[in-house]
Amino acid sequence: MTSGDVVSEYIINQNKWLIPAYLVFVGARTPERRKLALAAICTTYLLIALIVLRRIPISSVSSGMELTQRGLKVLEQAFGWSRVNTATVLAGGAWAIYLSTNFLTNGRFKWLPLGLFGLSSISLALTGGRMGYGAWAAIGGIFSAWRWRKGILLLPLAMALVLAFVPSVQQRLLQGISTNSGDTEIKDASELTSGRTDAWPVAIDRISASPWFGYGRHAMVRTGASAEVARREGLKEGERGFPHPHNMYLRIMMDSGLIGTVPILLMYLIILKRSASICRYKKGEAASIGMATLSLVLALLIAGLGSQDVFPVQGTIAMWASVALALRVHRDMVLGVYQAPELMTEPAEETVQAKTANAANEPEPLWEKARGDAARSRYL
């Protein structure tokens, strides 16, 4: 590759997916704009769910094999994404829609959030992506333990109903597992993990050879690991093997080593922490934005155990826009300029006059000034 190709492929094409996020961060300065941005993000995921419902008939849920075949072919034609990526997008998108719709509609349509959540979850089931199933359940468990204690009892019941009445989901989850004679055993680990158990040991061997700096982009192909996996799977010469280890964390380690992996994971940790910090209110704009962002980022990090990429790609445009929206709210809160409908209460006139008089007579404490300056210095 020429230097121009490198710039085009790894700088321009990689970062162009962040342009909507930048526009959201710069533009979402008022409650009205933030509400429009959140509505646009939720609409994106809802449209993806509707496209899946249109392309894959609901009758496919009766057979895991049919769901697998349709997921491999139809989703590739509809989006250009694999079923794994589509399932990850919908796993986080379903929860983001549920957590945001009640705020966007001002609570006027009581059953709308639950209905849209159910529709998105059905679309997720139709993709046949098992990592998406796992991410969906894990996000529900995390939010139940954190915010909705009743959900700890309801979530297992909901999962049991899905497994009982949607045979294809059960068949996909148990693919590669034998349950004959009342005993449960793994009959084919490669089938259970869709070949990932063939790729992971090879990737780990390469990582152990260069743990600090890695091998650069496309390390799986450049180091010959992909060809080795192809030989283990019995693929003929010329047939495509694993171009990456189908594990986001192994992929980062192969490409960037520990030197690059630690800052990237710290960045995601900061995003999660700041998104959670703006959820101090149980209801309202900030809580909806924070929890929607948490659900989308958690879906990526959980499903990353089976695939995904830490760098911006087409399927994560809306996720990064949501991250930018959460960071904008967090920034405004730190700077003391955040305005939201739930905070806009009219204080009594006497209280305002009393506070104004006290503020005029009392100097600002030095520690308060220092704390405010330190908070502002992080952004200015």
Image (tube, rainbow, N blue to C red):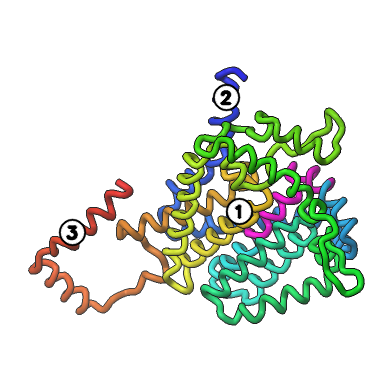
From the viewer's perspective, is 365 left or right of 89? left
Residue 349, image quadrant: bottom left
Main SS category, magenta section: helix
Distance of label 1 from label 2 (alpha carbons): 26 Å
Drawn side of residue 364 relative to residue 281, left or right:
left
Looking at the rendered structure, which numbered label has been put on residue 300?
A: 1
Q: What residue type is disc 2 on?
A: Val
- Quadrant containing the N terminus in the rendered view: top right
Q: What percent of the width, then of the height, locates residue 288?
A: 51, 65
Name the residue rendered at 28%, 76% in the picture: 347
Residue underneath mark 3 = 369
Q: Is residue 125 visible?
A: yes
Q: Are marks 3 and 1 in contact (CB under 8 Å)?
A: no
Mark 2 vs 3, N-terminal side:
2
Residue annotated with mark 2 = 6
Q: Element under label 2?
A: helix
Horizontal and vertical percent for residue 371?
Answer: 22, 59
Q: Amino acid at mark 1?
A: Leu
Residue flagged by tag 3: what amino acid is it?
Answer: Lys
> How crowded is the residue under tag 1: few (<14 C-alpha within 10 Å), some, or many (20+)?
many
Q: Nearer the viewer's eye, disc 2 or disc 3? A: 2
- For the question of whether residue 175 can be seen, the reply is no
In the image, the segment drawn in magenta is 73-93
SS for tag 3?
helix
Question: 75 or 184, which lies in front?
Answer: 184
Left/right placement of residue 129 relative to residue 31 reads right
Identify which residue is drawn at 83% across, 69% down. Answer: 184
Disc on the earlier residue, 1 or 2: 2
> Residue 31, how many percent across, how many down?
44, 60
Question: Does 377 appear in magenta?
Answer: no
Specify which label sits upstream in the sequence, 3 or 1.
Answer: 1
Task: Tell me the distance, in whole angstroms, between the alpha carbons under discs 3 and 1.
Answer: 39 Å
